[in-house]
């Protein structure tokens, strides 16, 4: 337990160190500052498996933060900055990649699977209902005669 | 027909299993390069050994070459260094160095001490060319064809296996095409 707490503290302090970003950097406006914050949280560090560049201590994350800062000061908009990163590091750097020929499966896959599931559920529900409908009215005239015979025999 | 439908869940499970298994065998630290089949990004950077001399993407044209990203702070680069010497000397493939975010003096001393496999070295002090290439760690080795087009990227150490199985066949292929 102690170890757990210790490592948690370490983790927290590490992210505190990494967060050198928006507060210490110079921006022309608060708008730019929040833009920087948003972008560094949206962009994924290529070297670390699942950290955004705002949280990562990797040297490459620092370089990318610098690039984001530079581009914001030069007046590039968010789309231009994201495109710049994707051009260099591929779709890996964005958590929400653009919809295109290489990512359509990622975007449409879950919806397709959900649709497939829905279709299967509907079909099997219909089948069940049909089965129970026929069970209810299933006695033919011959069977009814047979049944009444049996019942009348019992009464004797 | 109905019987066959019963096997549908099994088939679906098998397909998902194959996909997940394939995912396991993929190394998540190896990224696709966004630069494959694109020309090298244009750059103007000084030579490592000769600060007054400037190099550009034009200097990599003419022959299929390896562009090797290295630095003295990178332990794996030291591991692959002897093999780069072998490639340059025994196989006659030009190896171009991209000295990435390094100190010039340390890098020069390294090449004197460990011998120099590189045809020439680009000194990328700020990592600008590295960033344009999509470098996210060292060592990385790119195959650049005679037209200056990036054809392949290998992340990690180049050793006997990597050279024989991955790099050499491709270098030969692009040499024949060019």
Image: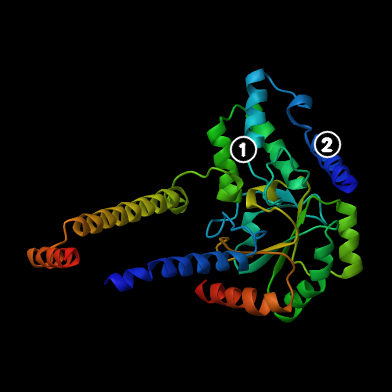
Instruction: Name the residue located 70 percent from the left edge and 78 percent from the top edge.
Output: B161
In x, y percent, where is residue A128? 28, 56
**Can residue B56 be seen at all in this image of the molecule?**
yes
User: Residue B4 has which mark?
Assistant: none
User: Residue A42 has which mark?
Assistant: 1
Instruction: Name the residue located 87 percent from the left edge and 47 percent from the top edge.
Output: A1
Sequence order check, earlier mark of 1 and 2: 2
Instruction: Name the residue located 43 percent from the left edge and 52 percent from the top edge.
Output: A109
Q: Is B5 on the left-hand or right-hand side of A7?
A: left
Q: State the residue in front, A149 or B144.
A: A149
- Judging from the image, what secondary structure is the residue with disc 1 in? helix
Which chain does tag 2 point to? Answer: A
- Label 1 to label 2: alpha-carbon separation: 19 Å
In x, y percent, where is residue A105? 44, 53
Query: Where the N terminus of chain B falls, by quadrant?
Result: bottom left
Q: How is the image coloured?
A: rainbow
In x, y percent, where is residue A53? 70, 41
Q: State the residue in front, B93 or B15.
A: B15
Instruction: Name the residue located 61 percent from the left edge and 38 percent from the top edge.
Output: A42
Q: Mark 2 points at which residue?
A: A17
**Quadrant location of residue A55?**
top right
On screen, residue A142 above or below B103? below
């Amino acid at each position: 337990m102690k170890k757990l707490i210790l490592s948690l503290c370490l983790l927290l302090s590490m992210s505190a160190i990494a967060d050198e970003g928006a507060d210490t950097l110079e921006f022309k406006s608060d708008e730019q500052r929040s833009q920087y914050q948003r972008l560094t949280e949206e962009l994924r560090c290529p070297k670390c498996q699942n950290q955004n560049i705002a949280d990562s201590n990797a040297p490459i994350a620092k370089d990318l933060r610098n690039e984001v800062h530079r581009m914001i000061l030069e007046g590039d908009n968010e789309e231009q900055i994201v495109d710049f990163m994707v051009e260099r590091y591929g779709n890996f750097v964005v958590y929400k990649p653009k919809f295109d020929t290489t990512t359509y499966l990622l975007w449409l896959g879950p919806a397709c699977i959900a649709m497939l599931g829905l279709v299967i559920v509907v079909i099997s529900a219909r089948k069940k209902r049909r089965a129970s409908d026929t069970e209810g009215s299933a006695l033919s005239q011959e069977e009814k005669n047979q049944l009444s015979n049996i019942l009348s025999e019992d009464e004797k | 027909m109905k019987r066959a439908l019963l096997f549908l869940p099994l088939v679906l499970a098998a397909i998902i299993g194959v996909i997940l298994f394939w995912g396991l065998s993929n190394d998540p630290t190896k990224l696709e390069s966004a630069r494959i089949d694109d020309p090298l990004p244009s750059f103007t950077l000084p030579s490592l050994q000769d600060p007054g001399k400037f190099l550009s993407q034009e200097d990599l044209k003419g022959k299929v070459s390896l562009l090797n990203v290295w630095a003295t702070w990178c332990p794996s680069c030291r591991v692959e260094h002897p093999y780069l010497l072998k490639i340059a000397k025994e196989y006659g493939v030009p190896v171009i160095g991209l000295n990435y975010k390094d100190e010039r003096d340390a890098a020069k001393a390294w090449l004197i001490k460990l011998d120099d496999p590189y045809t020439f070295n680009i000194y990328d002090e700020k990592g600008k060319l590295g960033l344009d290439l999509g470098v996210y760690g060292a060592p990385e080795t790119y195959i650049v064809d005679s037209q200056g087009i990036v054809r392949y990227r290998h992340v990690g150490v180049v050793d006997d296996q990597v050279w024989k199985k991955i790099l050499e066949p491709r270098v030969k292929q692009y040499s024949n095409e060019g």
